[in-house]
Amino acid sequence: MAEIIKSIISNVLTAFYQPFWFALLLAALFMLAYKAYPSAKDAARRWVEWFKTDSSFRKIFLLAFYTALILFRTLLNRNIWANPLCDVLGKWWIYTPDGKLTTEIIENFLLFMPFTAILFWCFRDKLLGGGVTFFKTVWCAVKTVFLFSFAIEMLQLVLRLGTWQLSDLFYNILGGAVGGIIYFIAYKIKHRKE
């Protein structure tokens, strides 16, 4: 059991460590485009100023950073596959049929929990409208993660980067739904105190 936990922790941390600096740079560049300014020096100065003073800028930066992490993990840091449809069903358990431990389903599940929570944190009013209800939050999380994850899977298929797998789609959506639930609980706790 300790070996399983050690392997899961190691694989999850590696999945976030490898793309960290690339994702940070990509998110910073995205935010520069988001708040375009005439010169690079002025843009850098303004960027730091916005980051210090504008909470919505920091939220969107975090969303851009995490989205870049996801894209790096799922598309940008992948080897080309000869047949991206070789394992359409994918892996549904932490052990392969030959008894080898794999953490792929746990990684897929955990990948979209923070994404959904950060997305709602940034764009709650646009995504959920006036009221935040449990059903609306979870349904919106499921729809959003399905579309995003399906787009990633289709890009993997078309670009031959990784394999197209139903299990990836399922566990990404499940993780996104749990992220929506976490956001809903945090939102209700915060607004109960006000």
Image (cartoon, rainbow, N blue to C red):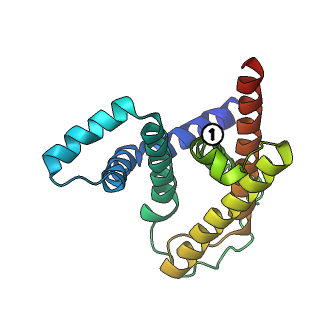
Give left or right: position of 134 versus 115.
Answer: right
- Nearer-the-camera pick, 175 or 53: 53
- Nearer-the-camera pick, 96 or 82: 82
Q: Amino acid at mark 1?
A: Ile
Quarter holding the N terminus is top right
Residue 20 sits in which quadrant?
Answer: top left
Give left or right: position of 98 versus 134.
Answer: left
Residue 108 appearing in the image: no
- Which residue occupies the extreme top position in the image? 193
- Residue placed under numbered mark 1 in the picture: 8
SS under mark 1: helix
In percent of the image, x 43 and y 44: which residue is there? 61
In percent of the image, x 37 and y 30: which residue is there? 53
Where is 125 relative to 13, above or below? Answer: below
In percent of the image, x 72 and y 50: which residue is there? 128
In percent of the image, x 50 and y 78: which residue is there? 160
Q: Position of residue 41 (x, y in %)?
A: 14, 45
- Which residue occupies the extreme right position in the image? 135
- Nearer-the-camera pick, 117 or 34: 34
Quarter holding the C terminus is top right
Q: How many marks?
A: 1
> Dot 1, crowdedness within 10 Å: few (<14), some or many (≥20)?
some
Residue 133 appearing in the image: yes
Q: Position of residue 75 (x, y in %)?
A: 48, 65
Q: Position of residue 47 (x, y in %)?
A: 28, 41
